[in-house]
């Protein structure tokens, strides 16, 4: 299971998501960034920043 915590990218945000693979995590994070943080354009460097913050979630294993 893969985990992304939004607070690692946007300080103060408690949102997080888990999925079986990084692609699904990135899809969910992009959707969250648009709806919760008002991001209208998701640039490649934002995707890179998201990917760098995805970790293995050993608790869900």
Image (spheres, rainbow, N blue to C red):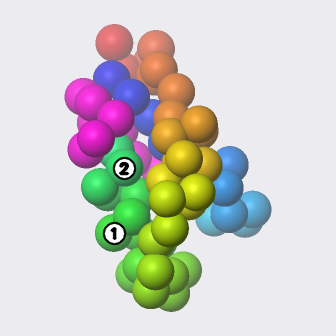
| Residue 49 at x, y percent in the picture | 60, 49
Is residue 61 toward the left or the right of residue 4 in the image? left
| Residue 29 at x, y percent in the picture | 41, 58
Numbered tag placed on residue 26 in the rendering:
2
Q: Give the quadrant of residue 40.
A: bottom left
Secondary element at image label 2? helix
Is residue 19 found inside the magenta-colored segment of the image? Answer: yes
Which residue sits at x=59%, y=38%? 53
Tell me the quarter of the image containing the C terminus.
Answer: top left
Which residue sits at x=39%, y=29%? 2
Evaluate if marks 1 and 2 touch, with contact meaning CB atoms under 8 Å apart: no
Among numbered discs 1 and 2, the one appearing first in the sequence: 2
Secondary element at image label 1? helix
Cα separation between marks 1 and 2: 9 Å
Q: Can residue 31 be seen from the camera position used here?
A: yes
| Residue 1 at x, y percent in the picture | 33, 23
Which residue sits at x=52%, y=27%? 55
Is residue 23 found inside the magenta-colored segment of the image? Answer: yes
Against 50, residue 39 (above or below) is: below
Q: Point out the stretch of residues depicted in magenta.
A: 14-24
Which residue sits at x=40%, y=81%? 35
**Extreme front residue here?**
44
Q: Can residue 14 be seen from the camera position used here?
A: no
Against 3, residue 43 (above or below) is: below
| Residue 15 at x, y percent in the picture | 51, 59
Numbered tag placed on residue 19 in the rendering:
none
Numbered tag placed on residue 31 in the rendering:
1
Q: How crowded is mark 2: few (under 14 residues within 10 Å), some or many (20 or more)?
A: some
Q: How crowded is mark 1: few (under 14 residues within 10 Å), some or many (20 or more)?
A: some
Is residue 39 toward the left or the right of residue 2 in the image? right
């Amino acid at each position: 299971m893969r985990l992304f915590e939004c607070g690692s990218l946007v300080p103060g945000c408690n949102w997080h998501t888990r999925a079986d693979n990084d692609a699904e995590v990135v899809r969910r994070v992009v959707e969250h960034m648009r709806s919760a943080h008002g991001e209208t354009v998701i640039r490649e460097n934002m995707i890179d920043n998201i990917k760098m913050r995805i970790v293995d979630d050993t608790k869900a294993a």
